[in-house]
């Protein structure tokens, strides 16, 4: 009876593991979704869509075209010429993946406001036609679709007239598509003259990769088509879209445009199966304008006009890796529609993946509990290979997007969990060390910890450590201004290098909280020079952060600036938590103090604050005193210094600051001469934050260098 009870308890391990895995598959947390998308990207890289000659062409405003024709924006007369050239070649439709939302600044009337000319000349120029009117006239014969962009700000100007009609089968489609409140469209005269107006906007995934192209969007209380959908409609001379909801009534199923039926996701998107770069697809715009493209090459084609020029900022991340022009996604989606070659993510895909996990996970978990490690490991490897192979076969042979990695990981976890129960406690502990600490310490220390497990305590021990806390000011406001995917990519690049700097100095990553990073030194392995490492690391971090922010600012992106605090003291270091999860970190007042030093930078105007406790073990670093700070919630003052490094913080004081040192000495002596000294220094350095800080204090009748902080 006892053996049966033990067996029943052991059997709960694979059941619990499989249950958790199945729940995660249905809940689809961001991490699992990212993993699944990465698998689909890898499929495309290994097996991209084979290019078939299709009447879809990209007219590319590339670097060569800008060099030959001139910088962007081109005069609307040039755009009109491009339209006429393409129309003369007998194209079916032209879609512009660019907007003409502002009047042409090169029109004669616009130039009259700039040029100083004789009255007679001005009257003659005023008679010339407006460039926008000429473009509108070029659009009138038909066949041209203009692009517009959607956003969440309600439009103050009227939207383009709808030149189409939606026929909704099975119920309204609006609740299921991506919804926006406003749009930025081309000039009204141009929009009215065009045969159609379509949305250029993509909805990339959280990593910024464009894997799907929407066919329709919600704008206010109406449906609007995408740019590619409008090109298909205009190219066929159709007036209606037919939108069908799925039979289970939980989303959309397909969009029909004339003779073409396009299967969609529940949100009305099309998965794009990309090809590699194909020369036949793209024609430089300058060649069209030059008239060197044979009409036979363009006749009856769907033309997408866009740009791959890096300076025009219409580059997107591709599942194949690297970047592509945004117009490329539109064009490749059109190719799929015309060749009827789609990627599908079946409606029951999650159910199939979950059943695979449950059946195989329970079977292999039971096998791991009853057989030796080698037999169960071989069986698990075989089953995982079959699952991965089935996913690959479904993609290559049936164009189905099934995720084999998530079920395979769940199966492996079920096997691993069951095996751990059977293994000896010493093996269980070694696995814990390898898996857990590889996430917490520098890579160069992991091997040493595994080789010397006796030096790693599964509790806590007292140890003197140095700490760095960083925070990024202004990133939250940036998230509100730019595409979230782009913001995340910028933050990831920033954090990657900040952590790499810490690892180069053999620091241990304590934690990442949003855009903030905490690093500790002398744990888990003691480092006699941990103070020097911490301060040198902090200075290198600040140098990098300043360069990174300046580079983005030059591109018009206000990334913000980094604040850093450095402190040293005795803490308790070890694993904390419970029997389920261990968290390796340091606890103690020095940790909080380092965090407070980072925060006080915003009140002091500085970027880096280092305590006397850290500075006492450092050489070769020039600093200047900030003052004796009584941090909020503390009673004892802490002497704090500001490093001077390469003039990044102190204008005109690249290696030392004797003028400030002399003024500060008067401040500590509490003499009336301090006010005069800081006034003179402030006149020379109006942007020096510490000079302004102490001058303000002295003018408020505060004396000495003791500063009581009332805020964190």
Image (spheres, rainbow, N blue to C red):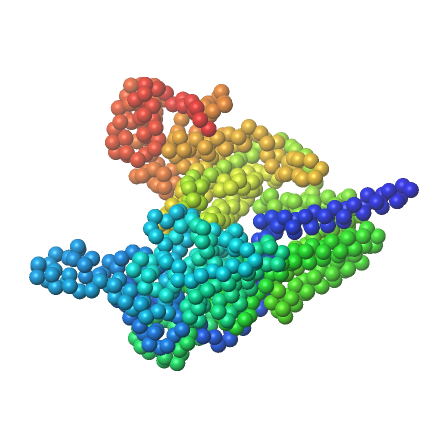
**156 relative to 284, above or below:** above
**For this rendering, which residue is in front, 340 or 602?**
340
Q: Does residue 359 appear to the left or right of 226 in the view shown? A: right
Residue 145 locus on image (x, y percent): 38, 65
Q: Residue at x 36, y 79 (%)?
A: 295
Residue 503 locus on image (x, y percent): 53, 46
**688 relative to 75, above or below:** above
Residue 563 locus on image (x, y percent): 43, 38
| Quadrant of the image occupied by residue 359 | bottom right
Q: Residue at x 26, y 59 (%)?
A: 104
**Which corner quadrant holds the N terminus?**
top right
Q: Is residue 271 visible?
A: no
Q: Is residue 668 visible?
A: yes
Q: Does residue 18 appear to the left or right of 688 in the view shown? A: right
In the rendered picture of this protein, how many numbered marks are placed on residues? Answer: 0
**For this rendering, which residue is in front, 706 or 480?**
480
**For this rendering, which residue is in front, 405 or 491?**
405
Q: Residue at x 52, y 36 (%)?
A: 467
Residue 265 locus on image (x, y percent): 56, 59
Instruction: State the residue lying farthest toward the right.
Output: 1
Q: Does residue 247 appear to the left or right of 196 in the view shown? A: right
Q: Residue at x 88, y 44 (%)?
A: 4
């Amino acid at each position: 009876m006892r053996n049966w009870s033990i067996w029943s308890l052991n059997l709960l391990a694979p059941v619990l593991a499989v249950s958790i895995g199945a729940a995660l598959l249905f809940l689809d947390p961001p991490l699992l979704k990212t993993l699944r998308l990465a698998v689909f990207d890898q499929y495309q890289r290994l097996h991209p869509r084979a290019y078939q000659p299709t009447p879809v062409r990209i007219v590319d405003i590339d670097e060569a075209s800008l060099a030959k024709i001139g910088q962007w924006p081109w005069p609307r007369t040039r755009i009109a010429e491009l339209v006429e050239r393409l129309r003369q070649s007998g194209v079916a439709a032209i879609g512009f993946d660019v907007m003409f939302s502002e009047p042409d600044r090169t029109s004669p009337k616009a130039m009259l406001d700039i040029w100083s000319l004789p009255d007679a000349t001005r009257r003659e120029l005023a008679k010339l036609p407006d460039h926008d009117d000429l473009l509108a006239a070029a659009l009138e014969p038909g066949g041209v679709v203009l692009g517009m962009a959607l956003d969440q700000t309600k439009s103050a100007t009227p939207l383009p007239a709808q030149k189409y009609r939606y026929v909704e089968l099975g119920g309204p489609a609006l609740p299921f598509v991506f919804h926006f409140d406003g749009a930025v469209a081309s000039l009204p005269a141009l929009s009215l003259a065009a045969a159609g107006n379509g949305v250029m906007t993509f909805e990339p995934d959280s990593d910024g990769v464009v894997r799907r192209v929407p066919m329709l969007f919600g704008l206010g209380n109406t449906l609007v088509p995408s740019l590619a959908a409008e090109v298909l409609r205009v190219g066929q001379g159709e007036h209606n879209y037919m939108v069908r909801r799925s039979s289970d009534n939980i989303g959309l199923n397909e969009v029909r445009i004339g003779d073409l039926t396009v299967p969609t996701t529940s949100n009305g998107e099309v998965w794009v199966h990309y090809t590699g770069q194909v020369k036949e697809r793209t024609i430089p715009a300058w060649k069209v304008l030059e008239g060197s493209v044979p009409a036979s090459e363009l006749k009856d084609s769907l033309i997408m006009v866009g740009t791959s020029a890096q300076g025009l900022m219409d580059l997107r991340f591709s599942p194949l890796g690297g970047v592509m022009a945004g117009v490329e996604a539109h064009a490749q989606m059109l190719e799929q529609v015309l060749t009827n070659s789609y990627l599908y993510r079946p409606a029951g895909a999650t159910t199939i993946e979950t059943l695979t996990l449950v059946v195989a996970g329970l079977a292999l978990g039971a096998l791991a509990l009853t057989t030796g490690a080698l037999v169960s490991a071989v069986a698990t490897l075989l089953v995982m290979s079959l699952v991965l192979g089935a996913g690959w076969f479904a993609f290559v042979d049936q164009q189905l997007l099934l995720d084999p990695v998530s079920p395979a990981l769940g199966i492996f976890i079920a096997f691993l969990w069951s095996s751990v129960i059977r293994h000896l406690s010493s093996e269980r502990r070694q696995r814990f060390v390898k898996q857990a600490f590889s996430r917490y310490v520098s890579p160069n220390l992991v091997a040493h910890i595994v080789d010397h497990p006796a030096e790693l305590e599964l509790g806590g021990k007292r140890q003197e450590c140095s700490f760095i806390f960083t925070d990024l000011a202004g990133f939250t406001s940036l998230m509100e201004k730019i595409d979230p995917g782009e913001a995340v990519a910028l933050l990831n690049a920033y954090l990657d290098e900040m952590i790499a700097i810490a690892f180069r100095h053999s620091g241990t990553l304590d934690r990442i909280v949003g855009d903030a990073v905490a690093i500790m030194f002398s744990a888990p392995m003691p480092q006699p020079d941990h103070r020097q490492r911490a301060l040198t690391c902090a200075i290198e971090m600040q140098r990098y952060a300043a360069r990174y922010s300046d580079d983005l600012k030059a591109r018009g992106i206000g990334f913000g600036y980094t604040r850093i605090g450095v402190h040293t003291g005795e803490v308790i270091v070890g694993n904390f938590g419970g029997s389920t999860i261990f968290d390796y970190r340091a606890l103690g007042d020095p940790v909080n103090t380092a965090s407070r030093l980072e925060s006080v930078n915003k009140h002091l105007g500085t970027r880096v604050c280092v305590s006397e406790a850290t500075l006492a073990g450092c050489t070769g670093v020039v600093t200047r005193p900030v003052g004796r700070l009584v941090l909020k919630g503390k009673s004892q003052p802490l002497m704090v210094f500001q490093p001077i490094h390469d003039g990044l913080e102190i204008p005109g004081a690249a290696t030392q600051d004797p003028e400030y040192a002399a003024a500060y000495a008067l401040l500590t002596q509490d003499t009336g001469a301090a006010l005069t000294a800081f006034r003179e220094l402030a006149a020379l350095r109006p942007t020096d934050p510490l000079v302004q800080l102490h001058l303000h204090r002295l003018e408020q009748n505060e004396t000495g260098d003791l500063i009581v902080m009332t805020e964190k």
